[in-house]
Image (cartoon, rainbow, N blue to C red):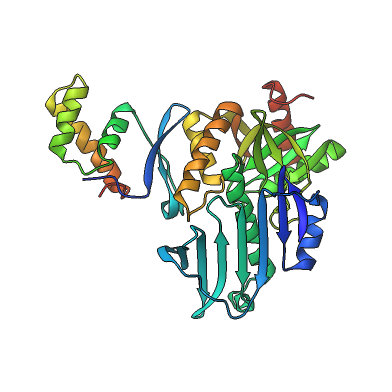
Amino acid sequence: MKIASGYTLVTIAGENVVVPLGDKNVGLKSLVSLNDTGAFLWRMLERETTRDELLAAMLDEYETDAAQARADIETFAAKLQALNILE
Amino acid sequence: MLSLSIAGLSVDFAYADVRFFEKRLSKYTGPSAVQPDLLLSTTLKDPLIPPEGAIVKTIDQVRIFRDSDGRLCRCRDYDGELVLVKVSTEDYSRTDLLLSPKLTGTGFTLADYEYVNTGGAFADRLLVLGGAVLHGSAVAIDGQGIVFSANSGIGKSTHTALWASQFGSRVVIVNDDKPAIRFVAGHPMVCGTPWSGKSDLNENMSVPLRAIVFLDRGKENRIRRMGTRDSIFRLMSQIYRAYYDENLGLLTTGIIERLVKGVPIYLLQCNISTEAVEFVYRYLISEGVITQ
């Protein structure tokens, strides 16, 4: 899976904000902001990445167990998929 | 060709609709610059010749091209015919607008199209130069700038009209719909431009921007300072952001960051009344944002 084109993550005044660009900006209805873990996953997903690769990166970066990391990844992916930001 | 000074930008503007623009631009005439910040031209032509280039994308009936000189071309058809061509250089320092008289079939006048598209060209260039156009009604009270921003129809202009009637000559409507924001020596300024929406309420002036107030309708008057996240979202909704150029879209994020860090931003729920005006005025004084 991968972040859909037309979206980018920027840090504005300390907030990690998903910014729709170009035509994705038309009819902007809501703003997505991410915590540091979400921003980490976003950076990974800027290129095609599997769930297993995300899990391995999470376990490498954070002091967490596999079950919690998997749950975090699924929550994150579901949030972006609901907004059509993930393809 | 008219030489103008708008929000500190030198603009050379060859307009088509003399009757509409002569009045609107009269306050902004300025000295001719050797190399203006922005060159704007409108030409009426029939038929229009489509520009050559690789199509980048089509958005809402607008075809977007890049020509061999790197210029961004936007084309719009109506009733199967090309009726609008807008060509901008890569840095938006020059925009040429070609309009077909057949555009009037859409229900809008040619002046409407010229007004909207030249305003957009100004906003694009301003972004490249480090400023932005914010959708709102801007007032200066005793030389202190406040922008009241909201979606259309909420009552921005009605609210600022009440400021003008409440405070008389102490208040000037800087721009009733699309004020320009610039940073001068690092300080945010709000500036008048001729693109002020339905009204002619705009002045060729720049004043320090003391506050941005987002308006919501409410039965009672309430105001609070907004947090960073909400401020970013509101600004992103109301700052002019080009749909046709992702790089311009990115530039707005830098402006938003400067505004969030440098300007107090509030959310006001209010009714349409002079009490609401007095309420905001007193509150901003108590916050130390403006002085009496």
Q: Is residue B287 visible?
A: yes
- Point 61% across, 79% down: residue: B102
Q: Nearer the viewer, residue B130 or A2?
A: B130
Say whether residue B220 is left or right of residue A19. right
Say whether residue B250 is left or right of residue B223. left
Residue B12: name its quadrant.
bottom right
Among all residues in the image, which is located at the extreme right?
A: B169
- Point 31% across, 50% down: residue: A84
Q: Quadrant of the N terminus of chain B?
A: bottom right
Q: Nearer the viewer, residue B245 or B243?
A: B245
Q: Quadrant of the C terminus of chain B?
A: top right
Up-down relation of residue B84 to residue B236 (above or below): below
Say whether residue B225 is left or right of residue A18. right
Number of labelled discs? 0
Q: Is residue B109 visible?
A: no
Instruction: Point out residue B235 in the picture as x, y percentages from the top left corner.
Output: 54, 40
Instruction: Point out residue A42 in the picture as x, y percentages from the top left corner.
Output: 29, 36
Up-down relation of residue B62 to residue B136 (above or below): below
Instruction: Point out residue B165 in the picture as x, y percentages from the top left corner.
Output: 82, 43
